[in-house]
Amino acid sequence: MITRFLSKELGLTHAAILVLNPEKSHYTIFDSRGVKRIPRSLLRFDGQHPLVRWFRTKDKETESLRHYLSRDRIQAALKNGHSPKHSGHHKELEQLDRILKDLRVGMAIPGHFKEALVGILLLGEKLSRRLFTQTEIHFFQTLVHDMALAVKTTEYHQNLVQHNVELVAKKSELEDRLSEIERLRKKEQETYYQIMKSLAQQIHAKDPYTFGHIRQVEQLGLMTADEMNLGLDAKRRAMLSAGLLLHDVGKIGIPDNILKKPASLDPDEWKIMRSHVEKGVKILEPLTDFQEAAEIVHGHHERWDGTGYPRRLKKNEIPTGSRIVSVVDAFHAIVSNRCYREGRPMQEAFDELRRCARTQFDPDVVDAFIEGMKKSKKVI
């Protein structure tokens, strides 16, 4: 999902992830996407490969270049004489430049867990030929760090399960190990959730008209829940927050020509657009502790009168969180500026919500939302 997102949303020639196979002590391509993707069987790096050795080695003189490599940085370092021409570092950099060129890789970013190099993210060039911004580079580094953590916790989890089977007779040790497995499983799910939030925010950040949209939707939704006196405990409040943040995460799988089309969609395009709900649920499947959030995502396009999609639920069949998302998302869309129109005044948005209560929206949610907005005197 990450390689697909990077290659598609950032317009790259390709994106690939090299991951360490601990049993065979070499790195192979776990996944590669893009118009110039690298076949999985093509690359296999052992521990002595120059790229692997570079990211595994610590050296103060070249420390900054070991955080990530790009052909631009390598060539700048060679040109500016940061390494003497006949020094080992100079020759290493020349060799690395040739490797990146042969692989058509514009940037390589390592993923470490403690001292271990777990994997390497390989990115092609932008189809636009523009350079990567520092914000994008920081985003890549965060993703690689989270991926490395997820790989190692999964590996540790599997090792613990196998070890515990062998020690099943030792009850107290087994219980300790199972507790550790559960802790790591929760950590892995939290990591996956953070990646999902990063991807959702990155999609909206690309469009200046919707930047900040999901964060404001989250705040408005939690305000509405408070006004409804739902008495949510910490866990259910966290589930509502996750549902509000990730309600449109399935749009990662919708083609840009449909997602950003300024004109009305035709019936076939609408069918594809509506599939983002099921895609979002599929993306959230690995989050077994977040199934309540997945249900919120599944129901956020259902309507109070039963004419929504994808399951045609009605009234109280629709999860409460989904009904809240539906109202606050519609309100924010009405008052927000777009490239093709200006946002409408808040009072007009309130009138529109009231008009659609009992058909599209839960009337109790509409009343609670408007009352909460008036109390808080929020300005969008």
Image (tube, rainbow, N blue to C red):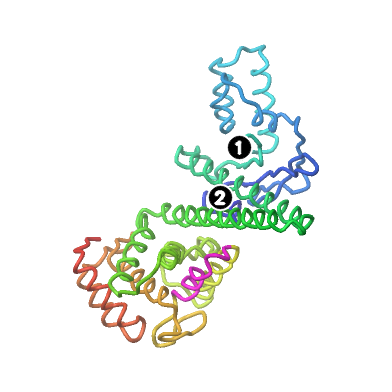
Q: Report the residue marked by disc 2.
A: 6
Q: Residue at x 52, y 65 (%)?
A: 290
Q: Residue at x 66, y 36 (%)?
A: 116
Give how far across and how far down residue 251 sits, in percent.
50, 64
Disc 2, SS: helix
Viewer-nearest of discs 2 and 1: 1
Q: Nearer the viewer, residue 303 or 58?
A: 58
Q: Is residue 156 visible?
A: yes
| Residue 122: quarter of image | top right
Q: Nearer the viewer, residue 91 or 317?
A: 317
Horizontally, residue 58 falls left or right of residue 243, namely: right
Give me the disc on residue 114: 1
Of mark 2 and mark 1, the one earlier in the sequence is: 2
Q: Is residue 297 magenta?
A: yes
Around disc 2, counting alpha carbons within 10 Å, would you say few (fewer than 14), some (14 to 19), or many (20 or more)? many
The amino acid marked with disc number 1 is: Lys
Disc 1, SS: loop
Q: Is residue 106 visible?
A: no
Above or below 41: residue 374: below
**The residue stretch that appears in magenta:** 287-300
Question: In the rendered structure, are the residues bearing label 2 and label 1 in contact, judged by CB atoms less than 8 Å apart?
Answer: no
Q: Residue at x 24, y 70 (%)?
A: 372
Q: Nearer the viewer, residue 94 or 292?
A: 292
- State the CA–CA distance, disc 2 to disc 1: 25 Å
Above or below 170: residue 303: below
Give how far across and how far down residue 173 sits, in percent.
69, 53
Q: Is residue 182 magenta?
A: no
Horizontally, residue 53 falls left or right of residue 223, namely: right
Give how far across and how far down residue 107 sits, in percent.
59, 37
**Predominant secondary structure, magenta span:** helix
